Image (tube, rainbow, N blue to C red):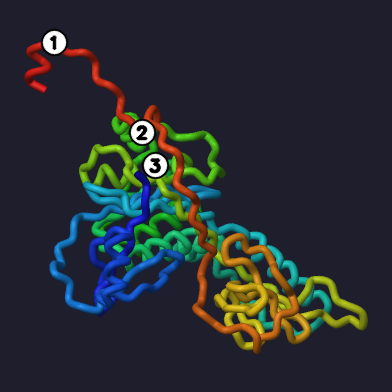
Amino acid sequence: MSHLFVPVVDQEQHPLMPTTPSRARRWITSGKATAFWKGGLFCVRLNVEPAARLVQPLAVGIDPGSKREGYSLRSAAHTYANIQAEARTGVKEAEQDSTRMRRTRRGRHTPFRKIRQNRKHSRNKIPPSTKARWQWKLRVARWLCQIFPVSVFVVEDIKAATTGKRRWDQCFSPLEVGKQWFYAELSKLAAVQTKQGHETKELREQLGVKKTGKKLAEVWEAHCIDAWVLASAAVGSSNVPDNRRLVCITPLCWHHRQLHRFQPEKGGKRKRYGGTLSLGIKRGTLVKHPKYGTAYVGGTMDGKVSLHDPQTGKRLTQSATLANCRPIKLLRWKTWLLPSPPPNKERLLPPRPRRAGRKQAEDL
């Protein structure tokens, strides 16, 4: 039976062991806890001192990917959360557009900043596109640590081919530089373990679960299955997954580096474009509108703001007045919960052992 567990924090915002939805409802009804939302997940905050603060070892498995990423949080007894996130993309193209526009402004003899020396030779420099990708993974990891008592992270290590030259191998690949930065920052939150790709495959075969080849599918078998087996290796559990419910998240991306339109309008004027504020309110703020309901704030035009659906990101309107929008909270990503998948015993049950003799059966 797949169901979501409810994260629990105490009065000081320290994470405790998750609880079941029924128990969380009883706590809220009796006044022992207060409900709140954190990153799209429903959580409860205890208003009384907890009866016990003992926590079980919780492991977070992380399966990095170029388009989709998988996160699975589990203990030896239960699987508490399965998260599939879209990777952070588009930063490389935004930087290329910014560089091209800056150079064309210099060619038009318009005011520009003084040309700086080449700063790309630093060994500690991480390209913006690479840093954005790994920063997004770190944001998700920090979010999980705020609502779950995470004890260890298990990451599937990805490697790039090296040439064997020491100086070249240190900084030739943004992938290698980015992941080392990620491991260093992740170790500040909890212990970090890494597994190779072939080790993940062996763990899948031992646990008797199968991975699908559809990498972009919103199913547990796409990416969370590898994250689940990685977490299982850390907590020493070999049972089948009791929770395959999937939570999907997508980062909200804004045009930070594009302050105006590429092409000018009539009269040679360029309209303002990009930024993170719309009429003084932070973009991504969840608001309540009398006509469109719950939505988040997007761009602005002619003194109006645009509202978007918090799950799909589809634009609902471009002419909403700020006075009719009641702010609720600031969103950092879009979140949607998929329905419970149908049970598949053939896929989840471990492989049946071979028939043993009488003496061997008694030993087992």
Locate residue 289, reporting x and y percent: 62, 79
Q: Which amino acid does label 2 sit on?
A: Leu
* Distance of label 3 from label 1 (alpha carbons): 35 Å
Q: What residue type is labelled 1?
A: Gly
> Could you say which is closer to the camera, residue 111 or residue 14?
14
- Residue 360 figure quarter: top left
Q: Name the residue under label 3.
A: 226
Tag nearer the camera, 2 or 3: 2
Q: Mark 1 points at which residue?
A: 357
Q: Quadrant of the C terminus?
A: top left
> Could you say which is closer to the camera, residue 242 or residue 216?
242
Are there few (<14), some (14-19), or many (20+) residues within 10 Å of tag 1?
A: few
Q: What residue type is labelled 3?
A: Asp
Relative placement, left or right, of 78 versus 111 is left
Residue 348: numbered disc: 2
* Distance of label 1 from label 2 (alpha carbons): 27 Å
Q: Which of marks 3 and 1 is nearer the N terminus?
A: 3
Q: Which of marks 1 and 2 is nearer the N terminus?
A: 2
